[in-house]
Amino acid sequence: MKAFADPDVEARFNAYPPHVRQKMRSLRNLIFKVAAATDGVGEIQETLKWGEPAYVTAATRSGSTIRMDWKNKQPEQFALYFNCNTNLVDTFRTLFPDDFKFEGNRALVFNISDNLPTDELAFCIGASLTYHAQKRLRKQKVSSKTPD
């Protein structure tokens, strides 16, 4: 398990109830694992955004921020949040309609009792961590095409 570099993030994790903390740490570990295995992502910056653990590709700017949280008002659920100004959640909904519960165009929602669909979730995390790099690549391909 990767050590926390930011004491505020560590404190946030420690504030979760133990059964929730375990699930949140599993998500955190998967984010770091996918980031390390994905070309072009680079080091992940772990921080708090809106009081929630957030994961940013600050060095490479290859991806879109991922956040996660559990809230007292919905104690049996936790979520992985994506930027709602992207097409990420719509893409996940198309590819994995039966694997996730979706919240609008911004989140994958899990029940505490669920086993996480790790392979599908790794795909979603990888897509977010490379979102901007893929978008730049598509623009380059379009601009490099010349009419015949």
Image (cartoon, rainbow, N blue to C red):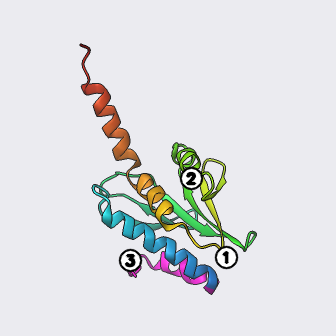
Residue position for label 1: 113
At x 43%, y 67%, the residue is 31
Q: Residue at x 28, y 55 (%)?
A: 40
Specify whether 15 is left or right of 148.
right
Q: Earlier in the sequence, mark 1 or mark 3?
A: 3
Q: Is residue 107 magenta?
A: no
Q: Amino acid at mark 1?
A: Ser
Q: Nearer the viewer, residue 101 or 104?
A: 101
Q: Please state the extent of the stretch shown in magenta in the rendering.
A: 1-18
Q: CA distance from mark 2 to mark 1?
A: 20 Å
Residue topped by disc 2: 96
Q: Is residue 16 above or below residue 84?
A: below
Query: Left or right of 102: which side holds 85?
Result: left
Determine the residue located farthest toward the front in the rendered image: 98
Residue 58: x percent and y percent?
35, 58
Q: Amino acid at mark 3?
A: Ala
Label 1: element kind: loop
Mark 3 sits on what residue? 5
Specify the quadrant of the image occupied by residue 22: bottom right
- In x, y percent, where is residue 62? 34, 51
Q: Quadrant of the N terminus?
A: bottom left
